[in-house]
Image: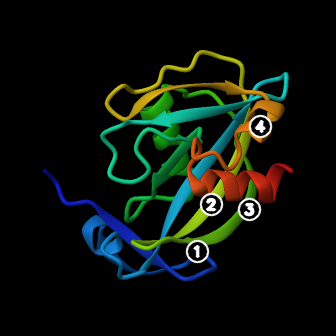
Amino acid sequence: MKEEWFPLVNEKGETIGKATRKECHNGSKMLHPVVHLHIFNKAGDLYLQKRSINKDIQPGKWDTAVGGHIDYGETVEDALHREVREELGITDFIPQFITRYVFESAIEKELVNTYRTIYDGPIIPDPSELDGGRFWSPSEILENMGKGIFTPNFEREYKRLFM
């Protein structure tokens, strides 16, 4: 299997080096960039993916529609379009940048580039990555907050951006 390389960045998103996926996820806290896309339909419902039960981080939990790492040498926008295509089969959408922030967990430190879009077309979740997905109404999301159904990062991001 080919070694994955991620850019190391400062908090402005400027590349200052590179490291392997393993190095970035071993507790070293090397700041590396990722992309998130929140997909709303015209009714205002939010699409969430169900993480595969085989994932090493937050298996089986509901999470942001799309989330993924930026590869070394790849732009944020190119990574966003690649991840959306790979995870959900969507190729035609217009992303709107929302914010950039640092997220830190016990094993990694990410610079999260967050986007949103409105989309009502077909969504085809990749079964090797996800255990499905669906649209959730805002009230349904609120009713399930804090119950261990969602990933902690999704809950934090949702509260910060959409409440």
Give yes or no for contact between labels 2 and 1 (Cβ–Cβ under 8 Å): yes
Give yes or no for contact between labels 2 and 3 (Cβ–Cβ under 8 Å): no
N-term mark: 4 or 3: 3
Q: State the mark number for residue 113.
A: 2
* Residue 40 spot, x, y in % from top left: 75, 32
Q: What's the CA distance linking mark 4 and mark 2?
A: 27 Å
86 up-or-down from 59: above or below: above
Closest to the observer, 52 or 72: 52
Q: What's the CA distance linking mark 1 and mark 4?
A: 35 Å
* Mark 1 Cα-neighbour bin, 10 Å: few <14, some 14–19, many ≥20: some
What residue would you read off at disc 1? 13
What residue would you read off at disc 3? 99
What residue would you read off at disc 4? 143
Tag 3, which secondary structure? strand
Q: What's the CA distance linking mark 2 and mark 3?
A: 6 Å
36 up-or-down from 89: above or below: below
Tag 1, which secondary structure? loop
Which amino acid lies under the numbered mark 2 shown in the image of this protein?
Asn
Q: What's the CA distance linking mark 2 and mark 1?
A: 9 Å
